[in-house]
Image (spheres, coloured by chain):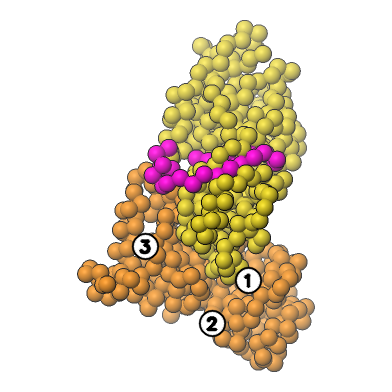
Chain colours: A yellow, B orange
Amino acid sequence: MTTLTIHRAGPAMTVQDLGREGYLSIGLPRGGAADRKALCESAALLGQSPDHAVIEMAGMGGVFSVSQPTLISLTGAPMRATVDDRVLTWNASHLLLPDNRLTIGPALSGVYGYIGFGGGIATAPVMGSRSTHLTCGIGALIENGTALPLGPDRNADRVGMILPTDNRFEGGTIRYINGPQTGLFDEATRARFTQTEFTRDPAANRQGVKLNAAGSGFATADQLNILSDAIQPGDIQMTGDGVPFVLLPECQTVGGYPRIGTVIPQDIPKVAQTAAGAKIQFTCITREEALSSYQSPAGLTRDLAALCKPLIRDPAQMADLLSYQLISGMITGWDA
Amino acid sequence: MRDPRSTLVDVTQTPDIFAFGLDAALVRFDTTMSDKANRAALAFAAYLRDSHTPFHEVSSTLASVTVRFDPLKTPFEEVEALLREALISRDWGASALPSDRKLWRVPTVYGDDFGPQLTEAADLAGLSITNAIDALSTTRVRVLTIGFAPGLPYLGSLPPEWDIPRQTTLTPRVPAGALVVAIRQFVLFANASPTGWRWIAQTAVPLFDPARSPASLFSPGDEVEFFALPASRFDEVSTAPNGGATWEAAE
């Protein structure tokens, strides 16, 4: 079995997958990766399903090594990644060898960076998922010296792929659809909401992000006397003073503050990846428009896999490869 | 106008159905809490779980039901039609509750250090401490919903005199197992938490354990009696399985 060792861990590093479904009735939210698209990108680069667990790094990376040659992917918020002083391309897959030290620095833009592994992280699932969910007492933060098992890699010859990057790390326009409580907000408030430029507050975590704007808040008529009801990731919830929070995968299952609508699943990664201080604006679209670009994680992974291109082969790495007698025809993923 | 398909229910009175994100629908039985709306939500959710539907998850809150589906396979219009048909098939507010419910008896220490705000809550309810403990410890309450934290139940309804307001300020911290009261409901905390409700008693029940199956001790619809235990016996129940709570099938 291959072991991944995390020699140094940033302050908010966890194991994540697509989360655990089916427990809303006992108050356990889905959880899972803040940026589900990054999991699909990882899966596409590694040639596996998006169900595999990855390392999520909030804001800051760490230092990693593996006990066997292992394919890794680097996706999500771009971070400076190096192996023995060679810079690794982000949004790409690479071969990591046992005497390599992978060093990942702070996010250059965005918030959540991800390292995927051929075969995935193979910790024991809890309630159907490997996702750490700290507020629910499931799993734990990764600390310096943590060792994690990796699953068998069935695509070990697939090294050095790269995906085109999209820009979901700088804020921008977020699409949402109306929901069960949209009608509680009058038309003028709804119009003002889509005309307002918001700044992401420093207060943000895997439960949600707070958004600030000049001017008055976005309250409803009877804001504090609304019966608590089901809430879900993507909901744009107005707190007591009318300040919006966009809820993320670890949001509670029930909430009492009114929600003006729900960010579409395709744009939740963009909300999660908007760094403090970056600007966000909302646009309300129809359900039909939202569905026209909606994909399941498996569907998105298939489409992304078709966009993967080989990274340029780097002759400087041939010596390393030959010394490990890997599968013939393997190319390296390092680039200078 | 009556829907010709319905012989039981006036459809103008049937609940609203909303699209809720791309992959869920929400059925709202009421916009205020009532026993009838909660019964309807519990019964309707149980019916959908036991029926053949395209829903991969059904959950209920105080007065609503959420269903999740794959929007790439099932159009919302189909979900809406299916829910509408199920809604008009009977009067859900008058329906029997699910049959597989449990009646829990939870040992509970009331007042003093185990419930520092019992006196205040009893005053607001217009009862003496003794009468308050009698009322609270003998009322059989229902798990109205589970939320806020995993395994954390909202329980009700208490007699009308317990329609006491929340506090205007938060109590910074009550411990795991704390029983708090407001608006004719109890909340029993799974973990140490701030609260705006008044802390009246203490239990030792482990409400949520991801390593246990089922992970949540209670299920929505279960009934609970928080019977009074002398403070001297709290240590004893603390080390007992399930914090000394026992159950039998609810009638």
Q: Is residue B2 above or below residue B84?
A: below
Taking depth in this image into account, of A134 and B18 the one nearest to the observer is: B18
Taking depth in this image into account, of A162 and A20 the one nearest to the observer is: A162
- Report the residue marked by disc 1: B188
Label annotation for residue B48: 3
A270 in the magenta segment: yes
Dot 2 amino acid type: Arg
Q: SS at mark 1? A: strand
Q: Tell whether B198 sits left or right of A255.
A: right
Residue B108 in picture, x, y percent from top left:
66, 79
Q: SS at mark 2? A: loop
A277 in the magenta segment: yes
Residue beneath the point at 48% across and 30% down: A48
Dot 3 amino acid type: Leu
Q: Which residues are magenta?
A: A266-293
Residue beneath the point at 70% across and 22% down: A82
Q: Residues within 10 Å of mark 2 (few under 14, many from 20)?
A: some
Q: Quadrant of the C terminus of chain A?
A: top right
Q: Tell whether A175 sits left or right of A55.
A: left
